[in-house]
Amino acid sequence: MSHTDTKLAADGPLQDAAPPWAVRGPALAAGPLAAIAIAWVSQAARSGGDEASLSRDGAVVLGLMAWMAIWWLFQAVPIAVTALLPVALLPALGVGSFTDAAAPYASDVIFLFAGGCLLATAIDRHGLGQRFATAILSVAGRRPAAIVGAFAVVTAALSAVVSNTATVAIVLPLAAGAVGYVERHAAPGPERDRLVRRFTVCLLLAVAYAANIGGCLTIVGSPPNAIGAKLLSERTGEPISFLGWMRFGAPVVAIMLPTMWLLLTSVLQPVRGLVLDADEGPSFDAPPPMTREGWFTLGVFIATVAAWVSRPYW
């Protein structure tokens, strides 16, 4: 495993080093300048008689969106600071009260995200994700296509209950271990290096795509799911339950996951012809011993999922 992979597994992708000041500095100024320019153009159009143009409040919100997008994209300041700009600026600019600006931060959807992130952090910290993944991957044996398929299933299953990003952070070190195993045990031949390279690309793409596909399965699998469910509930007046979402998410996952695996392993990055000369399947580092905190985390995780699933009944 490379140093980059180790750092990703340990700290998560949100802990990556920020861009250099040569990038962040101009972005720091570009954010508010873009906001001012957009608001001014919108108001100039309205003053010119364009009735379809935005109101003052709409122009301010649109400018603030551009400001936040620039700062988020180039990480001009910490992500959390950018996320709090509406609370500081909207009341100061007369677009609603502080109570109105702060209320969305206490939405039940936000607490749902926070709970999912806390669960994912605890699962990763106490080795539960690695324990779950290695148990399933041991079944794959030494067939390259089966190894890719096992990783896809594991990633999709984890991504259904924790965030896509956290899932990849858990699975990526195991994928690096599988790549190392294949590099060591691939049978010699004229196309050996090319096939190993194809397997590496195929496996990493499978992990990335499976995380997104598995995130469609449940309402907590990905933040857009919860946001979409909340908007649909407000429009229709009928709440969308955990199981109600799965009625639509499960068929999507059941179709897309095997289709993705088939396309990757047979068409886009075919691994046919890659033979492993070892008798045993890929071996991974043993997960850490199950601690009291690990058992407690497992209990909280099971109770949380049970509450999500049974919510419509109570």
Image: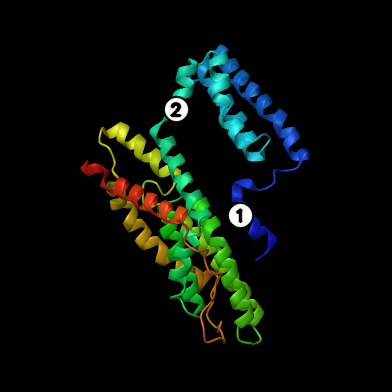
From the top left corner, tell me how far across and down residue 116 is, in percent. 44, 45
The residue that label 2 is drawn on is: 104
Task: Count every numbered label the image shows and give the total.
Answer: 2
User: What's the distance in space between the residues labelled 2 and 1, CA to CA?
Assistant: 31 Å
Q: Which mark is residue 113?
A: none
Question: Quick one: label 2 or label 1, which is nearer the N terminus?
Answer: 1
Circle 1 Cα neighbour tier, 10 Å, few/some/many (<14 / 14–19 / ≥20): some
Q: In the rendered view, does 266 fall on the left or right side of 160?
A: right
Query: Where the N terminus falls, by quadrant?
Result: bottom right
Q: Is residue 207 visible?
A: yes
| Quarter-of-image position of residue 150 | bottom left
Q: Amino acid at mark 1?
A: Ala
The residue lying furthest to the left in this view is 313
Q: Amino acid at mark 2?
A: Pro
Q: Which mark is residue 10?
A: 1
Front residue of 26/16: it is 16
From the top left corner, tell me how far across and down residue 65 is, in percent. 56, 29
For the residue labelled by badge 1, is the local secondary structure a helix, a strand or a loop?
Answer: helix
For the residue labelled by badge 2, is the local secondary structure a helix, a strand or a loop?
Answer: helix
Image point 70% across, 43% down: which residue? Answer: 18
Q: In the rendered view, does 173 fall on the left or right side of 313?
A: right
Instruction: Kindly check if marks 2 and 1 are in contact, taking CB atoms under 8 A apart as contact.
Output: no
Query: Where the C terminus falls, by quadrant?
Result: top left
From the top left corner, tell me how far across and down residue 285 is, in percent. 56, 69
Front residue of 63/285: it is 285
